Amino acid sequence: MTQYGCARHHTRRTPTISLVMGNDWRYWSHSPERGQEGWDRWINQTMKSLLRKIHTEQELIDAQFEPKDGGSTFYAQIPSENHSFLETFRNHSKFFKIYNDTFVYSVNSSLTNPIVTAYQKPGCPVIYNSKVEPLYAFFDRHKFGALHKYPYSELSKIPIFKVAALYFVKGNLKQVQRRNLQLAAQNECSNTVYGWVDMKEEVDEKENSKYLRFIRAYDLPLMVFIDRRSETTAVWKKALLRAKTELIPNLFKKAESAQPKVVSQPRISPISLILGTIFGIFAYFAFSYFYPLLKPHKAQRYNEV
């Protein structure tokens, strides 16, 4: 592999086996193994599905808190173990494993068709609708959970209709911060995307520093809520869990009141525009002709001889 090839695939040595899935090199895995036998072992382990069966409601709740490195939880209910959808679900779980997503399923014999649910935040189910989008697109749209670490390239891709709730730190999240961020997002089923940003990484890039410049005015860590539609930004330096009750409700009220008001204007038809123009020209010439006749004549003054 050439030097350009190593840089393109973000490898430091050759020969190297890499698992290239998706378009973002941040999620490509590189084998630490050397030699054919080690590579085969690594490929089999990396491509192994982590899909598992659950039996109780508590197991489903635990699965929603399971992703600790930025993933979401996908839950499938199927009519039977022999249903063909189970294999489809298993195959998708292999691909989205690189995003640290959790895949679980249960059997519900009362169902006719499978039901797939995504949990980006604990307690906030989003049910898949096959009439709206393909299954892969559904997984891709919900693959990042509340503990996802956002690089700048992904920050700029957060949909404008979403409120970004981002926790800014220097370095990695501490264990207590991870837990509190998950709890802050739990049951917060509004139109909000949770995640965190490591300013140690982002501050080195010019483009990123321009976008995140205002963060440097504050001491870290801190929580920032950004609503681009209403141009509302709120900085929260108190405890994460208090933001859930003290800041978020007021933030959405402000965002709602800040929405620009649209004033409907009467639509002007082309015929009305033409007639209006003709009338304006006629009025101008009529005024120019009759105005001198209507002006009062000044009395003439004669000089006495």
Image: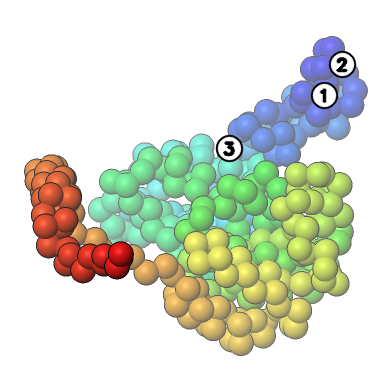
Earlier residue among tags 3 and 1:
1
Front position among marks 3 and 2: 2
Q: Secondary structure at mark 2?
A: helix
**What is the count of numbered marks?**
3
- Amino acid tagged 3: Phe
Tell me the quarter of the image containing the N terminus. Answer: top right
Image marks 2 and 1: residues in contact by CB distance under 8 Å: yes
What residue is rendered at 76% in x and 72% in y? 222
Is residue 12 something that shows in the picture?
Answer: yes
The crowding category of the residue bearing disc 1, from other C-alpha atoms within 10 Å (few below 14, some 14 to 19, many at least 20), is few
Which residue in the protein does label 1 denote? Answer: 7
Tags 3 and 1 in contact by the CB under 8 Å rule? Answer: no
Q: Residue 79 at x, y = what percent?
A: 33, 53
Residue at image mark 2: 3
65 vs 142: above or below: below
Apparent side of residue 141 relative to residue 71 in the rendered image (left or right): left
Identify the element where label 1 is drawn.
Answer: helix
Whichever of labels 3 and 2 marks the residue nearer the N terminus, that label is 2
Is residue 275 toward the left or the right of residue 147 in the image? left
Determine whether the residue tagged by mark 3 lies in a helix, strand or loop: helix
Quadrant of the image containing the C terminus: bottom left
Q: Which mark is residue 95?
A: 3
